[in-house]
Amino acid sequence: MGRVINRSLLNTRRLSANLVTYPEGHRVMRHNDPVGGGSYYKLNFVLVKPAEGGVFETDRVIFSLLNRVILFRPDLYDHSVSAIQRGKRVLLSIALHAPWGD
């Protein structure tokens, strides 16, 4: 199994953008991403879907288009990605840590 390649495209106090490549065999265990205060939003664009596996799952989404463009709250809801059985998964992930809400 290869390693995850995470390229930071933008990283500020409130906004970040990463290009992430997940190799065959990788999976993301069910978890959430707590923040110290405010609200955390992620907008994920699945640029390359694996031929088999690598399915994103979460308790709740704000918006999903064909399971390729997904807006969700990783601070509030558990999420995971099933094992990539064949191919790779490439994701453009844009995260916003907003000062409002909890």
Image (cartoon, helix red, strand yellow):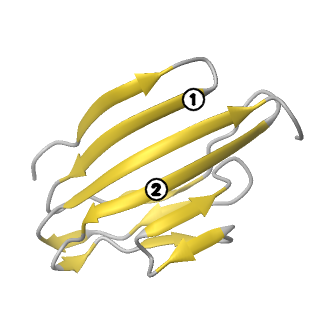
Question: Which residue does the numbered mark 1 point to in the structure image?
Answer: 15
- From the top left corner, tell me how far across and down residue 66 is, in percent: 44, 82
Question: Which residue does the numbered mark 2 point to in the structure image?
Answer: 44
> Does 63 appear above or below 28?
below
Query: How many residues crowd around disc 2 within 10 Å: few (fewer than 14), some, or many (20 or more)?
Result: many
Quadrant containing the C terminus is top right
Classify mark 2: helix, strand or loop. Answer: strand
Q: Is residue 65 left or right of residue 45?
A: right
- From the top left corner, tell me how far across and down residue 56 is, in percent: 44, 70
Q: Based on the displayed image, in which of its 4 quarters is residue 51 positioned?
A: bottom left
Residue closest to the far top: 13
Q: Is residue 46 left or right of residue 39?
A: left
Residue visible at 40% across and 71% down? Answer: 68
Query: How many residues crowd around disc 1 within 10 Å: few (fewer than 14), some, or many (20 or more)?
Result: some
Q: Based on the displayed image, in which of its 4 quarters is residue 54 positioned?
A: bottom left
> Does 59 appear above or below 35?
below
